[in-house]
Amino acid sequence: MLKLLSSAVLSLLLSLGLMPSTLEQTEALAVTTTTVATHNTLHGQATFKPLADVIGWQEVDTAEGHSKLGALEFYDHFRPGEDQLDARNSIAISWRKNKYEKTGDGSRLTHGGEAGVTPSRFVNWVVLKNKETGAKLAFVNTHYISGAWNGEHPERQERWRTHNAVVREVVAELLGRDLPVVLVGDFNRPLSQDIPGMNHLRTAGVDGVPIDQIYVSVGIGTGPAERLEKSGSDHFAYTATVQY
């Protein structure tokens, strides 16, 4: 009798919308796991490998680099510049097209270029929807000016700080949409940054902070980043896993 009464009460609560259905409960408990990576490709000289589900590349600024990127099987790419060698495209983003669909994107100039000093610099991002779970992830990729903190070009620090301010604004806007956020890139500074709402992932087995870094919004990191091979670059690639 008690079991029948409990079933009747449960059915009443469901019919009144006061208790989530089994499907809703399952969806609420569903977790999406995504691997992410970053790699500076040395002006496209590196081998472009399927490092993760979502990859942020830097220095894809040659025809050779874009040819290699286009030949990477099973990935779609975000390259927002109209011309292939547009500076925006040097920080391309790739994702496994069988797992994700792009539902949003953007690109912001951080500062202009100067001959012999730096190309124009940008922040690129995409919003990706997991085709199986429906969960969305915002993925941000960038590449800061070089030499600002090596003691040789202190005059570049103003550009670096301007760039960092734009990165923080982009991340804040995406977090404001209640999206989990991953930020990767070549920061050209061996120091983790204080980015509100984000955690820097240390790299397992590596002392200090490399200039290539991965940040994740609070609560979605599953562990330290992992350093991979250089694969023909002068930079190591890095990967990590997130759950959201």
Image (tube, rainbow, N blue to C red):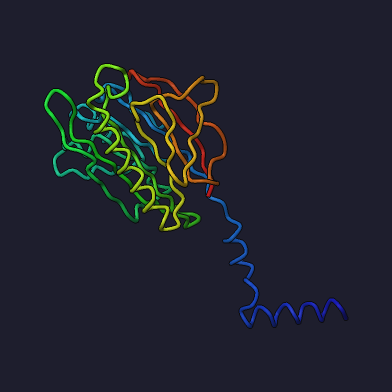
State the residue at coordinates (49%, 43%): 34
What is the residue that sits farthest to the right in this orientation?
Answer: 1
Q: Nearer the viewer, residue 207 or 104?
A: 207
**Can you say whether 14 is above or below 59 in the image?**
below
Q: Nearer the viewer, residue 100 or 233?
A: 233
**Can you say whether 65 is above or below 33 in the image?**
above
Q: Residue 62's x, y, as percent?
A: 19, 28
Position of residue 86 in the picture relative to residue 48 (left or right): left
Q: Nearer the viewer, residue 172 or 14?
A: 172
Where residue 205 sits, quadrant-wise, is: top right
State the residue at coordinates (42%, 53%): 175
Where residue 7 sits, quadrant-wise, is: bottom right
**Can you say whether 25 is above or below 174 in the image?**
below
**Can you say whether 176 is above or below 20 in the image?**
above
Position of residue 193 in the picture relative to residue 149 (left or right): right
Q: Residue 98's x, y, as percent?
A: 41, 47
